[in-house]
Image: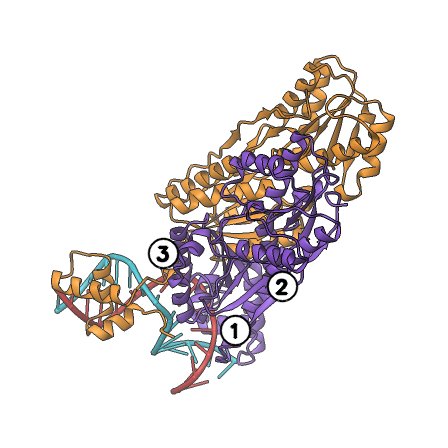
Chain colours: A purple, B orange, C cyan, D red
Amino acid sequence: MKKKVTLKQIAKELDVSISTVSKSLRNSLEIGEETRLKVQAFAKFYNYKPNNIALSLKNRRTKTIGIIIPEIVHYFFSTVINGIEQVANEKGYSVIICLSDDSFDKEVMNMELLAHGSTDGFIMSLSKETQFKKDFHHITEVIDQGMPVVMFDRITDEVHCDKVIIDDKKAAYEAVEYLIKLGRKRIALVTTVDYVSVGKLRTDGYTKALLDNSIPFDEQLIIKIEDVDTSEITIGKLLEDKAIDAVFAVNELFAVTILKTAHKIGLNVPKDLAIIAFTDGIISKYSTPTITTVSQSGAKMGKKAAEMLIQRLESEEHDDEDEIYKTEIIETHLIERESTD
Amino acid sequence: MKKKVTLKQIAKELDVSISTVSKSLRNSLEIGEETRLKVQAFAKFYNYKPNNIALSLKNRRTKTIGIIIPEIVHYFFSTVINGIEQVANEKGYSVIICLSDDSFDKEVMNMELLAHGSTDGFIMSLSKETQFKKDFHHITEVIDQGMPVVMFDRITDEVHCDKVIIDDKKAAYEAVEYLIKLGRKRIALVTTVDYVSVGKLRTDGYTKALLDNSIPFDEQLIIKIEDVDTSEITIGKLLEDKAIDAVFAVNELFAVTILKTAHKIGLNVPKDLAIIAFTDGIISKYSTPTITTVSQSGAKMGKKAAEMLIQRLESEEHDDEDEIYKTEIIETHLIERESTD
DNA sequence: CTGAAAGCGCTTACAG
DNA sequence: CTGAAAGCGCTTACAG
């Protein structure tokens, strides 16, 4: 077991001072060429690499980004992480990931843990419980301490920081309008509980699309699902009793559940029932029939969020305190597949 | 902007020494009760939390686990991370995640980056390229330096460390035997290129099951896929020309592609063609028909790996140098769904 | 051209 | 009961 070598050891071995070693390795011209090369050769031989922790302490920056998301086993969030990781890596940052499991307490705990030295800033998407409680003290606190935060997807207006979202309302509007253009009249909405910010916005888009096209709005056609696994009955009732000819589902898990239920009942998709899902994921692409979706590029959101965060991180160095926060809107578009004709 | 408060500041404010503050906060009995309570109250008021980085440097342990995996947008790997994160959290560890993108160079770079102070140990699954090159110097180096490594799923015999796997050969054997019991005679295998360790083992299991049941082995029934997206033609040929009645696919993406191709050709699944996939993921559960799979619990693997790593981390503290590495085998079982009758 | 000193934020063995 | 000192591994302004 050969432990990692430190500056101190090199200095001792070569009988020079630690400062000299440090400077030589940083190629300082202060140091004579002979010494410099000698030190560099030695360091290379022993595969010296500076200790990140020591550097972090010294520089007061860790070059790591904290990511706090509700779930990782979720295609959308994985792609976001992918996007973040990609630009972070390019710019020499690492990412440290914490999951809130949609729990407020876990979100707070994780945030506090990371805020104390572990990361330079945060990229996060709010947990359901946080959105429900509307308690954001942990986030404002971190911002107050001078750490930048970028929120994406599940955000709140109550915190001032950079944000990356899609235009949920508009995207939902377009999806529903697309169904209307196909001649569908009785369009149901299958969505989440209301306090999830994006759920709310998508509902607004749905409603507006109906109104603008003078399709009667029927509250009974909106169903809110708390847990997919127990939703089959509710969905079954919707399909059987309400004589609907299209569904707009707020995520693809809902959509595929509707698809399978329709199948059982004997409805043909898309003939009897057209389906559009929000969030283009792996399920929609591989289900039978494949499902038309609103693409919501997680990778793009992640990249954008990382860029915004790093930009703020690096500009802060110049003590550039502009408190003008931006909200970036990522374009969505419809991916037409077999579940609509 | 109120910066985080440090021991030094508290000391100054309260006109005591830094040592006294530190000891008070750690509830040392060395310090008089009055001082102790005063310091604690003050610290609480200013929401003092020790700086993780400083602690890491001092203690020479970071309490974080480095995870290096090929891909995050992959149900199996997400569930593994979930499992790791869960036990890590319980035991007070954070996780820092790096993706290799199945590239050798990225794997090496990430490992070196993290090895220099950022983590106490690693949990990893090898990139394809690493398995192909059989170059593991970056891993042995880290181990030589005294950092424990736990490998899972895509492992190698050439590195001595703790490992968590499933019995790929046995699981494949059982899956194929299940098909045979159903009366299937011409069973194809759709697998990955050979250097992926698990692919090789699953092929072995497939072959053995055939032999043991005196089913003629036909090399033409094995196809190796490099890239799913361009595999439809190869799969189409297999289905049309080879008169097969069952397929064992080495992952669910292959399986669902087969399923869709069969559909197009007009084959009924499971009547004309039975399908079993390795790795139980979200696609198998939601496809139509649903796909029978070999469960390979990523969550369990992750949990186990984290337990093993942390156990080694904590026992090292007692300088307990037992070089007896273990390989844990996680049980698999068949989840019967609609793609087999 | 080289090195001693201070400092990042903490802990702890040792004096007093 | 309290504090000065050393040290974790580094960098850098300052002496010489």
Q: In the rendering, which numbered label is found on residue A90?
A: 2
Mark 3 sits on what residue?
B59
Does the residue at mark 1 contact the one at mark 2 (Cβ under 8 Å)?
A: no
Q: Nearer the viewer, residue A230 or A319?
A: A230
Q: As shown in the figure, which amino acid type bears the numbered disc 3? A: Asn
The Cα atoms of the two marked residues, 3 and 2, are separated by 31 Å
Q: Is residue B13 visible to us here?
A: yes
Compared to residue B232, the image places residue B97 above or below, namely below
Chain-order first, disc 1 or disc 2? 2
Mark 1 sits on what residue?
A325
Query: Do discs 3 and 1 belong to a common subunit?
Result: no
Residue at left offset 63%, top offset 54%: B106
Q: Secondary structure at mark 3?
A: helix
Compared to residue B274, the image places residue D14 above or below, namely below
Q: As shown in the figure, which amino acid type bears the numbered disc 2? A: Glu
Q: Nearer the viewer, residue B237 or B267?
A: B267
For residue B181, side relative to residue A224 (left or right): right
